């Protein structure tokens, strides 16, 4: 079997690479790689061919990884092809394609991890990387590597055409259409930016306890933003759609929506005011307001923070943390959503994990190391940015489920407060849960009615405290539609979040004193 080096990969060229190095079976239907009906042996052989390895080579690499007495090792092969095209003021001014290819090798000894990677996927280079990772352990090899068996997975993001098979002439008209919609929507628009970015990622994971899995992961993000001017005042805002989809996601309806919503969000800011500062009820809109749930609460439920006793939730398993009608899940199985994964980056099946059920903290998010520490099963939450990084417990799609109230009930219950629709920057202290979030757009709530738009304010609070103050939850849960990337320990991974309309009885609003 021919071995593939990074140098050979790059010299083929990005345009030819997509077809030259991808097995024929994937060129016609990448979803076939995940369809249980396809012969399992054929699927595995195609992925072996894709990365230039076989079972004999993998076992040889594992032998080198465990030669100093490591308890466990895994190999993470990855091939990513990404493209980006952007338009500014009627001109396509940026376009690129990037190809990344390599393997990461991890060795675990107790709760210690040795990690190394190589972009040269040859037996010699992989053995060298494996020996580097093996240095975490000091001892004699046990020689115990289980028989490697292929594990089929479900497909939560089937597509018909891979992005590397979509020509540039299908991308450019899409961003041109968004640009036209924004200019046509309002004559106050003076500047526009639109873009489309997409990814195709192939992964193969092999573990020393005998598990082999593979996955094809698509991704697309279409974005628009604009600047408008009125009487010398300028405002900017935007909107984007993102998910694990193919070219069919780029529909006339979605393009029109991106353009019109970008303009709506921008021109609304001309009439926006700053509310009074102080403690007051805050209503979070359904959808992307779930970023507050993700940042201020979700990170504190990742098991590594709790294993090290740095999270405020580290002693709260089995204890009430919210009202009984509050349920929070982290789900890797939502079809087509940005944070969805068929398998995690340790080769475990993705799943729906209840973090809070009926107000009780039920589970953390576990990778292999934390699951062993807590004597539970991994939750399919071991994720990494690329083959250059070891996996960590990470969120996927984090959201609160529907509650017993309605949107109308919640708004009517507020005498004076704010309705938050869009967040941008935020800062969180993971251990204590303290947060500050910048509100880009929302509205005042006065006498039970939505009134004036608001902008340029901060919400300041504590995640666990805010969770305990969720007094109403509506029945209109919505997932965020845009592209969010979660950062942790220098690694970024795609995630999503969601929320029904909820009322937090009191949060500090940094408005006008």
Image (tube, rainbow, N blue to C red):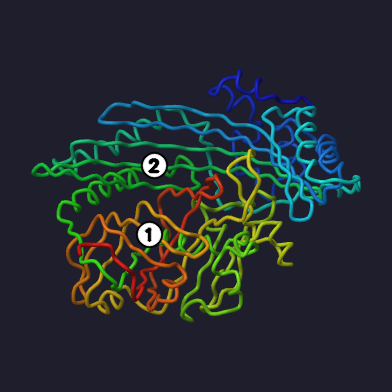
SS class, disc 1? strand
> Residue 66's quadrant in the figure?
top right
User: Which quadrant, please, contains the C terminus?
Assistant: bottom left
Q: Residue at x 22, y 41 (%)?
A: 227
Q: Residue at x 27, y 46 (%)?
A: 237
Q: Residue at x 32, y 31 (%)?
A: 87
Q: CA distance from mark 1 to mark 2?
A: 28 Å
Q: How many marks?
A: 2
Q: Residue at x 37, y 36 (%)?
A: 195
The percent coordinates of residue 327 (x first, y second) are 50, 73
What residue did someone put label 2 on?
222
Q: Is residue 23 left or right of residue 228?
A: right
The percent coordinates of residue 57 (x first, y second) are 82, 34
SS class, disc 2? strand
Report the residue that reaches farthest toward the left.
231
Of residues 132 and 351, which is closer to you in this image?
132
Mark 1 or mark 2: name the one nearer the start of the chain: 2
Q: Is residue 406 left or right of residue 62?
A: left
What residue did someone put label 1 on?
436
């Amino acid at each position: 079997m021919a071995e593939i080096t990074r140098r050979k990969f790059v010299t083929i060229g990005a345009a030819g690479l997509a077809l030259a190095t991808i097995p024929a079976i994937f060129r016609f239907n990448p979803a076939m790689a995940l369809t249980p009906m396809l012969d399992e042996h054929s699927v595995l052989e195609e992925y072996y061919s894709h990365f230039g390895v076989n079972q004999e080579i993998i076992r040889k690499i594992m032998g080198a990884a465990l030669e100093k007495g490591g308890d466990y090792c895994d190999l993470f092969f990855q091939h990513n092809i990404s493209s980006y095209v952007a338009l500014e003021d009627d001109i396509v001014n940026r376009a690129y394609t990037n190809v990344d290819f390599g393997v990461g090798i991890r060795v675990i000894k107790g709760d210690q991890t040795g990690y190394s990677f190589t972009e040269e996927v040859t037996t010699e280079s992989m053995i060298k990387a494996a020996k580097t990772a093996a240095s975490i352990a000091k001892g004699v090899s046990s020689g115990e590597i289980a028989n490697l068996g292929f594990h089929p997975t479900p497909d939560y993001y089937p597509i018909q055409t891979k992005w590397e098979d979509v020509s540039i002439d299908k991308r450019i008209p899409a961003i041109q259409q968004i640009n036209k919609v924004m200019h046509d929507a309002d004559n106050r628009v003076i500047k526009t930016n639109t873009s489309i970015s997409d990814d195709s990622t192939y992964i193969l994971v092999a573990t020393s306890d005998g598990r082999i899995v593979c996955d094809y992961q698509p991704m697309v993000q279409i974005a628009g933003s604009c600047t408008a001017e009125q009487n010398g005042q300028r405002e900017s805002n935007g909107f984007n759609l993102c998910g694990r989809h193919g070219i069919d996601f780029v529909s006339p309806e979605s393009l029109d929506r991106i353009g019109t919503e970008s303009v709506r969000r921008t021109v609304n800011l001309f009439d926006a005011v700053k509310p009074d500062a102080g403690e007051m009820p805050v209503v979070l809109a359904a959808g992307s307001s779930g970023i507050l749930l993700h940042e201020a609460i979700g990170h504190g439920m990742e098991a590594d923070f709790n294993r090290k006793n740095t999270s405020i939730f580290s002693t709260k398993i089995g204890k009430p943390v919210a009202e009984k009608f509050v349920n929070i899940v982290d789900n890797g199985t939502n079809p087509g959503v940005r944070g969805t994964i068929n398998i995690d980056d340790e080769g475990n099946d993705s799943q729906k994990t209840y973090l809070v059920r009926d107000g009780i903290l039920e589970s953390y998010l576990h990778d292999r190391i934390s699951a062993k520490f807590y004597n539970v099963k991994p939750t399919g939450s071991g994720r990494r940015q690329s083959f250059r990084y070891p996996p960590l417990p990470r969120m996927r799609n984090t959201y609160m489920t529907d509650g017993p109230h309605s949107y109308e009930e919640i708004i009517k219950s507020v005498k004076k407060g704010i309705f938050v629709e869009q967040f941008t920057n935020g800062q969180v202290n993971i251990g204590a849960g303290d947060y500050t979030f910048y509100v880009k757009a929302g509205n005042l709530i006065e006498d039970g009615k939505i009134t004036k738009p608001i902008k340029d304010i901060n919400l300041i609070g504590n995640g666990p405290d805010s969770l305990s103050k969720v007094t109403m939850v509506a029945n209109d849960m919505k997932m965020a539609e845009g592209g969010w990337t979660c950062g942790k320990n220098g690694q970024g991974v795609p995630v999503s979040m969601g929320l029904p309309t909820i009322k937090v009885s009191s949060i500090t609003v940094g408005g006008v004193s």
